[in-house]
Amino acid sequence: MRNAVKEKLSRGELVASEALPAMNAATLVVVQVESAASLTAVDDIVAVEGIDMVLIGSNDLHADLGAAGDYDHPKLAQAYERSMAACRRRGKHLGVGGLASRPDLMAKFVQLGARYVSTGTDLGFLVADCARRARQARDLPL
């Protein structure tokens, strides 16, 4: 979004005729591949106009592929290779999800061409912050 548009938006001075095109231009549309069915259809999914990125939900996907918990199973790497090829053909981006505990695989898929990496999950971030806040409250001087 252009700086002038951002400034107007932050001051509540932006009219809908300016706001909507600016917000649409700044919107990233991400779809997730988390099942064997979505992997099978990845070429068709990536071809949809307006999709900017395919994010592979590694845990859900490889569980659906029958390899739950086995991050080194070839099916997971093959899923990334297939999805990356589909993204390249259509000029879309690939994202890596669910591999925060495996930086080696994150690096491997970034080297393959992925351009987004999820560094954790909503639940993991929530639990970590709750624990931090609990420690903060517990450590209050009495």
Image (tube, rainbow, N blue to C red):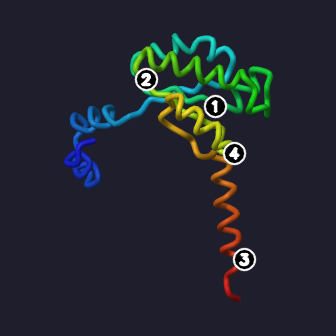
What residue is shown with label 1? 57
- Any mark on residue 138, and which? 3
Give the quarter of the figure containing the C terminus: bottom right
- Any mark on residue 101, and which? 4
Looking at the image, is mark 3 or mark 2 nearer the viewer? 2
Give the structural element (helix, strand or loop) at label 1: strand
Q: Is residue 65 left or right of residue 44?
A: right
From the viewer's side, name the closer residue of 71 and 6. 71
Mark 2 or mark 1: which comes first in sequence? 1
- Any mark on residue 103, and which? none
Q: Amino acid at mark 1?
A: Gly
Mark 3 or mark 4: which comes first in sequence? 4
Q: Amino acid at mark 4?
A: Ser
**Residue at the location (75% across, 22% down)?**
64
**Crowding near the residue tagged with mark 4, few <14, some 14–19, many ≥20 C-alpha atoms within 10 Å:** few
Query: Where 141 falls versus 127 (above or below)?
Result: below
Q: Position of residue 32 (x, y in %)?
A: 57, 27
Residue closest to the far bottom? 142
